[in-house]
């Protein structure tokens, strides 16, 4: 991918650690770019899972289907779970834009734990939550230690704010309309005054909200395939959609240990949990 992928200046990439809310941001980015052509009650998100609307780059390359990415008309939207340091140079060097979404690692851990159970077919196929926590604590989770990962994007977003928009899940959850507008502005397609007066932003936020998306038939009963040909049920991507669910699954002490690592790594960076 590093050698073959050629970024276009108009490309938009969504980058995140898995379970940071990629699904929501895929929906928001896709809806923002396509709302002009679609009335929202007939929008493709009513019948397509967000992961079907925005391709996952590494998977397309792993499946040898990277040509698919070449034929997407501009502006292309793709997602990646690669750390910034491993992104193709073509992405780093072009004037394409990256939206990064960050989530409290404690909630990422809990979300990963439930997701892994669903993929593997039950809790009995998994290590215990305490063992999973221990692996995560040591950075032995997919895509590696989360603090190192996020700092790559954070530092670059400070250096090049026009290239990387750094968002936090908890902020979007609290003020979705504000962040939907910021997202549109960053992608170069700000909402017009007429659209704002017609409450288009609020409607897009509603369409992409957890409670609406999760109840579409495609997200209740549909499936889509990924790299290792596991059938991912679309429903796996919608669990609780809340912050601080970690409180229901780990002790205060476990939370503090994890926070301490994160705070230590973030020291001096300006990034806070
Ligand atoms: P939980 O497991 O904590 O509920 P990803 O999309 O990166 O795989 O992350 C999945 C997490 O995002 C899950 O978190 C899921 O419920 C949450 N999520 C998915 N769609 C969402 C939406 N529209 N709004 C808020 N959260 C959403």
Image (cartoon, rainbow, N blue to C red):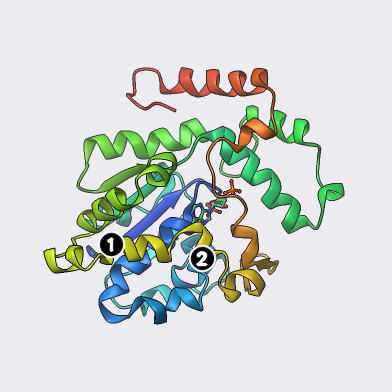
| Residue lying furthest left | 193
Q: Mark 2 highlights which residue? A: 213
Q: Position of residue 222 (x, y in %)?
A: 63, 74
Query: Which image quadrant is residue 268 in?
Result: top left
Q: Which residue sits at x=24%, y=51%?
A: 182
Q: Quadrant of the N terminus?
A: bottom left
Q: Which residue sits at x=61%, y=38%?
A: 245
Instruction: Answer above or below: position of 218 versus 6.
Output: below
Instruction: Answer above or below: position of 249 versus 229.
Output: above
Q: Mark 1 highlights which residue? A: 201
Seen in the image, is 205 located left or right of residue 103?
left
Whether the residue under disc 2 has CB within 8 Å of ligand 1: yes
In the image, 27 versus 81, the foreground residue is 27
Q: Which secondary structure lies at badge 1?
A: helix
Residue density around tag 2, few if under 14, some if 14–19, many if 20 or more, within 10 Å: many
Seen in the image, is 107 located left or right of residue 202?
right
Q: Which residue sits at x=66%, y=73%?
A: 221
Seen in the image, is 73 located left or right of residue 214?
left
Verify CB contact (< 8 Å) between mark 2 and mark 1: no
User: Can residue 31 be spotted in the picture?
Assistant: yes
Residue density around tag 1, few if under 14, some if 14–19, many if 20 or more, within 10 Å: many
């Amino acid at each position: 991918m590093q050698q073959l992928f050629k970024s276009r200046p108009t490309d938009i990439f969504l980058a995140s650690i898995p379970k940071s809310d990629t699904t929501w941001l895929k929906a928001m980015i896709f809806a923002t770019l396509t709302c002009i052509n679609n009335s929202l009650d007939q929008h493709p998100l009513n019948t397509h899972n967000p992961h079907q609307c925005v391709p996952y780059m590494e998977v397309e390359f792993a499946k040898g289907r990277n040509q698919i990415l070449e034929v997407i008309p501009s502006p292309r939207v793709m997602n990646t779970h690669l750390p910034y340091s491993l992104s193709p140079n073509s992405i780093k060097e072009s004037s394409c834009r990256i939206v990064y979404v960050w989530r409290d690692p404690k909630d990422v851990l809990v979300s990963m734990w439930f997701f892994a159970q669903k993929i593997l077919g039950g809790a009995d196929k998994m290590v215990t939550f305490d063992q999973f926590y221990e692996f995560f604590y040591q950075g032995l989770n997919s895509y590696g230690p989360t603090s190192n990962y996020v700092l790559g994007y954070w530092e670059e977003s400070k250096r090049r704010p026009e290239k990387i928009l750094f968002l936090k899940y908890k902020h979007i959850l609290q003020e979705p309309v504000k962040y939907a507008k910021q997202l549109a502005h960053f992608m170069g397609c700000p909402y017009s005054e007429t659209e704002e007066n017609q409450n288009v932003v609020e409607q897009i936020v509603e369409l992409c909200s957890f409670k609406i998306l999760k109840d579409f038939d495609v997200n209740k009963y549909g499936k889509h395939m990924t790299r290792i040909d596991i059938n991912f049920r679309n429903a796996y991507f919608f669990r609780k959609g809340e912050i601080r669910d970690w409180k229901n699954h780990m002790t205060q002490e476990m939370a503090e240990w994890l926070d301490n690592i994160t705070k230590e790594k973030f020291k001096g960076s300006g990034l806070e949990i």
